[in-house]
Amino acid sequence: MSQTPTVNSNPKTISEFKEKWDQIVNIAKQKLSASAFQNWISGVVVNEKKIMCSNIFVKDFIIEKFRLELHEREITEKDFEIITSTPQFKMNQQVETEKRMLEKLKRTIPSGYHDITLISAEKIHGSALIQPLRAWLQYPKQSILIYGAVGRGKTGLAIALLREFYMKPLDIEVEFIFDSSSSVASVLRHQATEKGGEFDTVQKLKKIDLLVLDDFGRESDTDYIKRHLFDIIDYRHANRLPTIMTSNLSIKDISEKYDPGIISRMQEWLWIEFTGKDLRSGG
């Protein structure tokens, strides 16, 4: 005679069931897009009469299995793995990932540059200037200095490179910092009064996957800031972590303004000089 399955109130049993359920939910969160997860979670029914427990541990439990919007059948965990490895599922996941990453990028860069890409930059500046940068993206270990007079499109090009660098490795989400050199200097000055504050900031600037510093040379001209900038550039250069800098200064100006060690390291960078018309004035 069969016995109706019951749920034992033993705390350990309940705890183990909850742990198992949490594991399943975490798998679903990792494997599904946000919308697909909501469809799945809203369709799950936990039937306690089908959860079989002993006084010591969960011997078995049956949840009316994962129902996905596109799969009108019950599936096991193994089925779930098969479904999430299909090309269509992976493509959907890639679209969701690209959307999320683009939203993060847009929160970081100025709104006027949200739509700029390397393709749009190439239409403005020509393929001769862009081609070396496409090669750089294949192996982005070298740093880049984009310099020239104001209004030539240096910031836009730096952001286009950042976008390509960040969006390309969809299987590994890289970290980046985009900021103006003067803003970084301001943060360092402010945190100098906080115990350990400037150290944390400098360490992050040193070790981030990609550092983009806009308007290098416009920060306050103090030994304190120059020392930190040298430390950041020196560390990133030694560890082959790419840095992209834009500057209105010429190479000669940079040589005169900063420690010789900075220009020495920059000698190994890729230099992109802007000599075209002022895009802002249309001249």
Image (tube, rainbow, N blue to C red):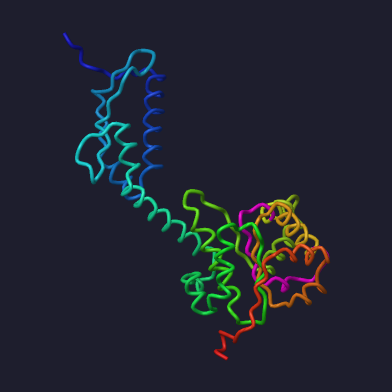
Q: Residue at x 55, y 68 (%)?
A: 159
Please tell me whether residue 231 is drawn above or below residue 52 in the rendered image.
Answer: below
Tell which of 277 and 112 is nearer to you: 277
Q: Residue at x 37, y 33 (%)?
A: 24
Q: Is residue 80 left or right of residue 16?
A: left
Please tell me whether residue 144 is drawn above or below residue 10 in the rendered image.
Answer: below
Please tell me whether residue 61 is drawn above or below residue 29 in the rendered image.
Answer: above
Residue 66 coordinates in the image, percent (x, y): 27, 36
Q: Residue at x 64, y 79 (%)?
A: 274
Quarter holding the N terminus? top left
Residue 59 coordinates in the image, percent (x, y): 33, 17
Q: Residue at x 60, y 81 (%)?
A: 152
Q: Which residues are magenta?
A: 206-224
Number of marks in picture:
0
Tell which of 77 and 29 is nearer to you: 77
Q: Is residue 90 left or right of residue 126?
A: left
Residue 109 coordinates in the image, percent (x, y): 54, 67
Residue 264 coordinates in the image, percent (x, y): 79, 64
